């Protein structure tokens, strides 16, 4: 009896289907091998990944249990992320013909230490932005257009000070970056970054950054507010800069920055509440200084709201034209924050 042979087309479909199943089943091993090879090309860092799997049907993959350690200090974790999800933005491809992607970071924990006497690295040192680019390009080699960060934490320690080290912690960081590759348009600014976080014990931070990623010179506009900040969390900064001791106090800060053509213009407006200061050392000079600082705080106090407010202008130049927007803003905010904290307590 004659038996009809399966057509070549049917065999091809079955072969492709089986190949996709095998690819999906073995994707964990394949992706892990590729990631471990690509991410560990810098001898200054050791990067580990616990698991990964690929979803070929939606063009994304999941990377779980990522940790980054510096080889000079393998006991200290520089960065850990519960999961990373790179995915293709199909809307940008279909509507604008641009192959770009988005990366989601779930529960990242970052530890930043600025130490002038830190152990020298094996290879030429990379800036923080270069480290970021190295990391993102190796996990997602196409253009990056959007980033989402959920429930992140940052610990920052700065030893590059004449006084004691400055420490600061950020909790519950949520960040959403859009249009970083100018898929829609980059006229004027174009790209947007929205951020919210908790500062130390109870301060709340909200910020919106508009910038143009295509300009060679940093071009950006930042509006940020920090509310209900417990000044006791930063009493060491006030003590070192104003030479007085803070017993208690709360503050709100409103910040505006415009960065155009290597020029920074803006202001920071602090509101101080329930501030109580005493001398750092028990002598006549410091008692007079503490009294003067308390008087300056009262001078700017609104008697209806019992708050202190004065607008502190911020201006300057970007020393290096090649400085990134991120580095420019971080440096400006660092200076503004320290200036504002000490402003009401220092003649």
Image (cartoon, grey):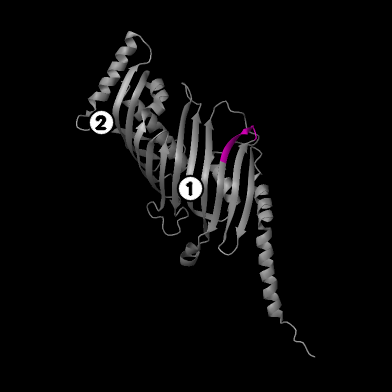
Residue 19 seen in render: yes
Identified at 28% across, 17% down, the residue is 292
Q: Quadrant of the C terminus?
A: top left
* Most distant residue in the bottom direction: 1
* Most distant residue in the right direction: 1
Whichever of labels 1 and 2 marks the residue nearer the N terminus, that label is 1
Q: Residue 149 shows which numbered tag?
A: 1
Residue 42 placement (x, y as % from top left): 64, 41
Q: What span is colored magenta in the figure?
A: 71-79
| Front-most of residues 188 and 28 | 28
| Front-most of residues 184 and 151 | 151
Q: Is residue 258 above or below residue 347?
A: below
Asked if residue 108 lies left or right of residue 197, the reply is right
Residue 136 placement (x, y as % from top left): 56, 49
Asked if residue 307 lies left or right of residue 66, the reply is left
Q: Is residue 288 above or below residue 167?
A: above
Q: Quadrant of residue 9?
A: bottom right
> Which residue, given by chain and number where applicable, does mark 2 sit on?
307
Residue 224 placement (x, y as % from top left): 35, 41
Q: Quadrant of residue 269?
A: top left
Residue 322 seen in render: no
* Most distant residue in the left direction: 304
Q: Residue 276 shows which numbered tag?
A: none
Identified at 48% across, 62% down, the residue is 92
């Amino acid at each position: 009896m004659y038996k009809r042979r399966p057509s070549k087309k049917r065999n091809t479909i079955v072969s492709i289907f089986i190949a996709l199943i095998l690819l999906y089943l073995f994707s964990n091993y394949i992706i892990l091998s590729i990631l471990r090879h690509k991410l560990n090309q810098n001898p200054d860092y050791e990067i580990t990944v616990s698991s990964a799997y690929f979803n070929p049907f939606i063009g994304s993959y999941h990377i779980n249990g990522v940790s980054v350690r510096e080889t000079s200090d393998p006991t200290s974790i520089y960065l850990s992320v519960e999961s990373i999800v790179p995915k293709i933005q199909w809307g940008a491809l279909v509507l604008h013909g641009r192959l770009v992607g988005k990366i989601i970071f779930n529960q990242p924990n970052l530890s930043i230490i600025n130490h002038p006497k830190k152990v020298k690295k094996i290879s030429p040192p990379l800036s923080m932005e270069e480290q970021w680019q190295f990391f993102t390009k190796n996990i997602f080699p196409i253009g990056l257009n959007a980033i989402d960060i959920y429930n992140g934490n940052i610990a920052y320690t700065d030893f590059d000070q004449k006084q004691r080290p400055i420490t600061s912690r950020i909790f519950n960081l949520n960040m959403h970056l859009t249009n970083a590759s100018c898929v829609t348009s980059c006229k004027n600014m174009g790209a947007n970054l929205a951020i919210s976080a908790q500062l130390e014990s109870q301060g709340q931070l909200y910020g919106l950054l508009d910038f143009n990623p295509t300009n060679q010179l940093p071009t950006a506009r930042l509006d940020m507010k920090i509310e209900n900040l417990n000044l006791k969390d930063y009493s060491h900064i006030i003590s070192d800069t104003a030479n007085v001791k803070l017993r208690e106090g709360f503050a709100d800060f409103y910040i505006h920055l415009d960065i155009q053509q290597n020029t920074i213009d803006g202001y920071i407006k602090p509101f101080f509440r329930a501030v109580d200061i005493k001398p750092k050392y028990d002598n006549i000079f410091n008692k007079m200084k503490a009294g003067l600082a308390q008087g300056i705080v009262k001078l700017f106090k609104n008697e209806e709201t019992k708050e202190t407010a004065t607008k502190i202008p911020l201006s300057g130049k970007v020393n290096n034209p090649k400085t990134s927007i991120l580095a420019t803003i971080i440096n400006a905010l660092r200076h503004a924050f320290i200036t504002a904290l000490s402003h009401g307590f220092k003649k």
